[in-house]
Image (cartoon, rainbow, N blue to C red):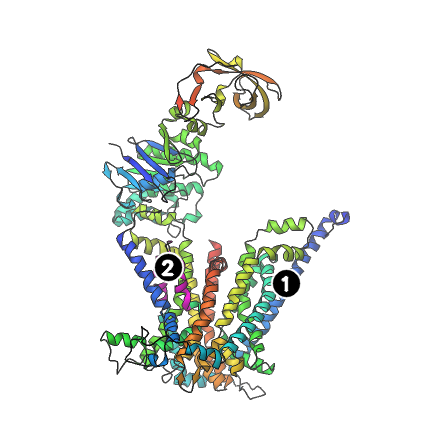
Amino acid sequence: MAGPRKSLLTRAGRPLVVAGFAVLLAFPFYWMAITTFKQTSDLYNLQNNPFVFNAKPTLEHLELLLHQTLFLRWFWNTTIAGAAVVAITLLLSVPAAYALARLTGRWGQRLGIGIFLTYLIPPTLLFIPMARVVTRLGLQDTLWAIIVTYPTFTVPFSIWLLMGFFKAIPRDLEEAALVDGLTRLGAFVRLVIPISVSGILTVVIFSFTLVTQEFVYALTFISSAEHQTVGVGVPIYLVRGDVYYWGSLMAACLITSLPIAVVYNLFLDRFIAGFTVGAVK
Amino acid sequence: MAVSTAEIEGVRPYARRRLRGARLLGLALFSPAVLYIVALVGLPFALAFLYSVGNVTVGSVGYRFVGLENFRSVLQSPAFRRALLNSFVFTICTQVIVIVCANVLALALRERFRGRGLVRFLILLPWVAPISLGAIGWKWILDSLYSVINWTLARMHLVNLFDPPMWLGEPALAMASVILVHAWRMIPFSTVILLAGLTSIPREIPEAAAVDGAGFWRTHFEITLPMMRPIINVAVLFGVIFTFTDMTVVYILTRGGPYDSTQVLPSLAFFTGVLGSDLAEGAAISVFLVPILVVVAALMLRIAYRAEVT
Amino acid sequence: MAIVETRQLTKVYRKGQAAAVHEIDLATRDGEFLVFLGPSGSGKSTLLRMIAGLEEPTEGDVLIGGKVVTELPPRARGIAMVFQSYALYPHLSVARNIAFPLKAHGVEKEERLERVGWAAKLLGIEHLLDRRPRELSGGERQRVALARALVRKPTVFLLDEPLSNLDAKLRASARDELAQFHRSVRTTTIYVTHDQVEALAMGDRIVVLNEGSVRQIGTPHEVYDNPADTFVATFLGSPPMNLLPDDGIIAGFRPESLLPPSAVQGEAVRLRARVTHVEWLGSERVVYATVDGGRFDGKKVIARIPVSIPATFEEGRAEELLVPRRQLRFFDKASGKRTAPPEIAWQ
């Protein structure tokens, strides 16, 4: 093991701090898991110790969720919308990021900062006029409302990330391609894009997670349960009057959150690299 | 792309043409994104201001300029004043908690250790999960009857199980709960950013400090933290934006209640403008977000400028 | 009493892997400039860092000033260190950088100012006290790093390749400044480098390291003229010593010892070689040749012949070259270690 002799405080303190935070931060998900599999009678019994299974674990909440609610529909809606949004995002941001990283000089930097600033304009400022625009276009209560509006936050973010990736590609490579006979556009399509596949993939993943996270626009533009996304459908529609179906609710949260978490973790290091380049530029 | 002798000999016009061609290509590649953003961000942004000084409702067809009428009416409403205060209080409290926790956590995570991957996965969960789902998870944990927190506290004889704290039902507790959930969500994000900043400090610097005689605390406060200042600023600014402009947590946990005590600007704007169909007043409320955004944007630009200069 | 002493100092990073530093014993002499010389991976930096307390030894002890310090943190060892990157605190002014170790040891403000002034004066950087590190040149940064090391009046200075990050041009003058600095403060100094020219120029003694072990400790003269094994023989000197293996024995001689007959007096061995390539470097010619005939037939040799010796060399032509017998060194082929001259016949 490299490094100097560590003091007892450091050696003992660290696992405590890390374990403590890990428990506190992950606890709600652990709680979701327990709630998902507990029988209703067990859940709503104040005498029971909530940390253990006082009755046998059950799949009834899962069954209810999957068969008697629109959960799968919402999941599907979100996936479709997500795919479409990611496609639009790539189409808009990959060329723009390349242009900003390469072809425009000082202007490029100003525009880049401008793009970044638009990311700071929140949906909670735009959603009211946006609602009107969406209604005027006749897109209300359809997934199209989302597909059209979500790129407003995925595109600036993606341009910013991709700029970092493109800047890291040495100009020499493209210049060699130009000498070899490609046009600039050709060099972009045949050389830069293939090299940046990992960066583009990162952008795909993070755009998709941004889509799944979104709440405000979906809540505002979509009024019927069948067209809703999973982020809004779950907390809003898994309720009968005042009564929440906690078992199924927690199941839904868990099913939705875990895959996103796994994928996100796989790509986090790449994201950090792009982020630190972008933030300090 | 073949190059003719004539082109080579007339070097200047050739170069100029290449440059112009490159510029045109840049413009072409760039325009779709810009056009999209201008149309779907710029336009609504302008409309937000227009609505706030106009008379628009969901049903109305025309537009009538009413000056500062909406603002006057909004500022007089106690709900608005409460929401404005809450927005600041929640944001500041959240940020303080987050920065302290993220600092501690980033320090603890700096060195490699066994299980670091798993720990990272667990720690990131609050940030990665959709906000609404994390919030509804907390709603269950803070439930008035079945809260696991209350059960645990009762077991430790700190509260009475038959008269438990209403985490989402009493104003002060509700505010604390909202702050807690915001902080819970932001700590992973800030930790990751701070960790990146921490690892960017060259190893030799803390070693030099160790040789120079600095113990852990002195090194941390006099060397590490000052060197991390730019990245801490970035983390704080993002944190402020994400908390100040968020309506999801409040909407899901408390719907702004009890009695508007946890209302914030974005959620009030939503209730007024979307549910209440008063677009003009809703817009006026959300316009109050702009000053904060401008300040944050200005500070971000300053950090970026400073980073370039050094 | 040696200022710095190591006893059987060992560092193993991962069980089962070869040791980075293997059972090293050494002791410094008072006020000397001791150089740790070796290629990358030889363990020289690890050794230094264990002396500093930045690495925990797997086995063995470090003694400073006669006291066992193996368990002590760096700040309790009375050492000062200059790092390869100088590790100046970027957010502090030069004055604050220099004052930092004093502040960390609780020295009062008045005395701090005085000592900073003294150190700055000694290194000629008083005019830089208000600047930030990023505004300084490489040479200036070295001086600030030295001032910061000096200001606590430590028992020993540890320098970890401080010249590696400098421009080639700058290196010579920076080296000179370092040597001057040592002459004026006369504190025991341990200096790590991979550059044998630096080692020969600056060291009072050189510790030649390879693969975690000490190959030889000696003055520059000793390690150059009487290398203890083939590694030391080839690591020092550029171009390296010519080594001709034959029958369990390796014969060696330095390029500057391979000369035309006109330049050699006294007992010498004769070598006939065909010239493959000549580099003219202004003050000398470097002649690359292949031995022609005899027991060393086909082996490559290099000769450095000063321009002051009149001789012409043509590519392809065979030449008669001599090596004075007293310049021959012999090494055992199996172990690489130095042995006594055997009876062998030359061409």
Give amino acid for label 2. Answer: Ala
The residue to which callout 2 is attached is B106
In this view, C51 is above or below C320 = below
Which mark is drawn over residue B29?
A: 1
Query: Tag 1, which secondary structure?
Result: helix
The picture quadrant where one finds residue C40 is: top left
Q: Where is residue C190 in the image (x, y as percent from the top left)?
A: 34, 35
Decide which of C129, B259 is in the foreground and name it: B259
Residue C68: in sight, yes or no? Answer: yes
Q: Which of marks 2 and 1 is nearer the N terminus?
A: 1
Q: Which residue is drawn at 41% across and 50% down?
A: B202
In the rendered picture of this protein, how many numbered marks are placed on residues?
Answer: 2
In this view, C115 is above or below B76 = above
Give amino acid for label 1. Answer: Leu
Residue range corresponding to the magenta coloring: B97-126
Query: Tag 2, which secondary structure?
Result: helix
Q: Position of residue C240 (x, y in %)?
A: 48, 27
Decide which of C125, A279 is in the foreground and name it: A279
Label 2: how many residues lie within 10 Å, few (<14), some (14-19) or many (20+)? many
> Residues at marks 2 and 1, common chain?
yes
Q: Is residue C152 magenta?
A: no
* Marks 2 and 1, how far apart at CA: 40 Å
Q: Does the magenta stretch include residue B111?
A: yes
- The answer for which chain carries disc 2 is B
Label 1: how many residues lie within 10 Å, few (<14), some (14-19) or many (20+)? many
Q: Where is residue C125 in the image (x, y as percent from the top left)?
A: 38, 42
